[in-house]
Image: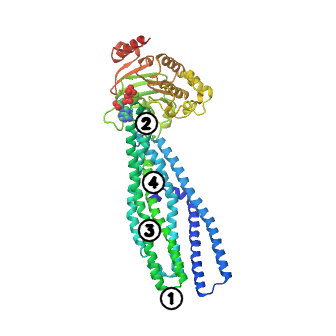
Amino acid sequence: MKFIERLSWFFKDRWLSYTIAISLMTIVSLLSSIPPKLIGDTVDQIRLGQLTGDELRDTVLLLIGLSLLLYVLVYFWITTLFGNSALIEKVLRGRLLAQLTRMKPSFFQRNSTGQLMALATNDVLAIGQTAGYGVMTLVNTVVGASVVIVMMTFFVSFKLMIVALIPLPLLAFAISKLGGKIRIRFMAAQASFGKMNDHALESISGIRVIRSYVQENHDLAAFDKVTADVMDKNKKVSLLNAMFHPLISIIVGISYAISLGYGSYLVFQKEIMIGQLITFNIYLGMLIWPMIAFGEFINVLQRGTASADRLAEAFAEQSDVKDPEHPVNVDFPTSIELKHFGFTYPTANAASLTDVSFRLERGQTLGIVGRTGSGKSTLLKQLLRQYPVQSNELFLSETPIEQISLDVVKRWVAYVPQEHLLLSKSIRDNIALGKPNASPEEIAKAIEMASFTSDIAGMPEGLDTIVGENGVMLSGGQKQRLAIARALLIDSEILLLDDSLSAVDARTESRILHHIRLERAGKTTLISTHRLSAVSHSDWIIVLNDGRVIEEGTHEQLILFGGWYKEQWDRQQMEASLEE
Ligand code: ATP
Ligand code: MG
């Protein structure tokens, strides 16, 4: 029972509700076995000519009373039991999201969004079904069948019961054969569903690119293939499911035949009465559902186990960046220092940073420049602790970063990524992401510093304008300035600007940088850029090439040095004057 093992915490927590539901179901089974007995007895009495009007009335009233009582009991066990399904789904979805928020980029490189969505939808649903419907079918099988078998023995004949149930082991054998296959096929169907999710997500988010390259039909055809695969895999699952029911009908049919044949013989031999034979046949009919339920149970359990396995795998993932066991207490970062820093992405073969060294005091600004792919973003990301670092190469306040607790570092750093990440909320909520309780004045100031004020005035609903998924209704430069306002609002110790002004014009850029210099005096800023004017005021500038520092110094020193920096600077100055 791997499923129970995996979800033992839940069953332990909900034992009372399960106990109540199972007790009620047992009572229902016991009560349901009374009417067949009453009917059989009545028939016998009729045959013997002993039935009185009073007795018949009492029996009829009893039958009606029983039905009403059963109605109430069934209502209660269903609501008790299936409440657990809904609850476990809710709990698991919450846990899954919490787990995902702990994961680092490498996890999301390995697990696509579609696969993770499949986990949160289909797999969680399958587990919920097992915890509700699965438990129901199990109890129906075990309790329902036991009660009927005991009643058959007690009220009719042990011999007849044994003979009539001879075909049953056949069923158990078939089910155990089919069960394993169902799980394998179900796993394949779920994986295929995840791929379809991926495709749908990509098609929707990339719709504009797809349209502009006139690839709609091509994309539709590709999607068609994926959905066909999902259909195919699900069909294969239902094919096996479909084999259960006819199988049960055959076996039950054989049982009826045996019971009628052998039962008549027993009546003839005067071992049982006709009424008992009737009772027995009704009981046999009552065994059909427990047998179907057994098939359903195996089915649901196999799916639930497959899904619980998939989910457990996701839960078992540990973040590859761990909190230090004995964190060193650092109040604020008085300096940032890299000593012969090297870094290789977990999935990459070659190093993205090699032997990078520099030191930045609190309040200074570092400029990071270099051609595309030289490692600028990679360098900034090191301060976000998204990847494990080599020990003793990156220091904050003379303390190796890996010895400072992750939360502390996170609180110091505000980051404006190169690719914009906006939520489909209002502009205000997007800006206040890092400080949800910011006052209107604080927000207005951050917006002003990011030179975003006049843009907002032009929006249909000002700060309350919803930006759409990933900011579809904003221009590139607006998205950048929104992201800058968001970072400036939290007034952090360290600000990372990753090419964050590339989409605004030169004048706006210099205005924003001027604001940042004024407002952030005494705080540390790291700026990566392709436009050198953005870093010319920096205290120190490093030029990266292929992950190595090839030039470094102040703007004046680098101009005097006459290398890549000076060449770029001259070219950009000339371009700027031509544009003027
Ligand atoms: P740009 O100016 O285009 O933004 P960059 O200087 O910021 O470039 P990086 O993004 O730091 O360059 O990339 C440096 C190198 O690391 C590149 O060769 C890139 O292919 C590689 N790289 C970047 N991100 C990853 C990743 N997640 N996994 C593996 N390799 C990566
Ligand atoms: Mg970059």
Are dots 1 and 3 in contact, CB under 8 Å?
Answer: no
In the rendered structure, which disc, 3 or 2, sits on the residue that comes first in sequence?
A: 3
The x and y percentages for residue 418 are 44, 28
Q: Mark 3 points at which residue?
A: 248
Identify the secondary structure beneath mark 4. Answer: helix
Marks 4/2: CA–CA distance: 28 Å
Q: Which of marks 1 and 2 is in front?
A: 1
Q: Estimate how packed mark 1 is, as few (under 14), some (14 to 19) or many (20 or more) residues with alpha carbons within 10 Å.
A: few
Amino acid type, label 1: Lys
Please name the residue that numbered disc 1 is placed on.
270
Q: Position of residue 289 (x, y in %)?
A: 50, 68
Q: Identify the residue at image location x=52%, y=63%.
A: 136
Q: In this view, does 405 lie above or below 335?
A: below
Quadrant location of the N terminus in the rendered image? bottom left
Give percent across and percent down for residue 85. Answer: 54, 55
Q: What secondary structure is marked by label 1? A: loop
**Residue 314 visible in this rendered orientation of the protein:** yes
Residue type indicated by callout 2: Gln
Nearer mark to the viewer, of 3 and 2: 3
The residue at the point 50 percent across, 18 percent down is: 508
Which residue bears the numbered disc 4? 308
Look at mark 2 in the image and give the residue it sits on: 386
Q: How is the image coloured?
A: rainbow
| Image height of 164 relative to 436, above or below | below
Looking at the image, is mark 3 or mark 4 earlier in the sequence?
Answer: 3
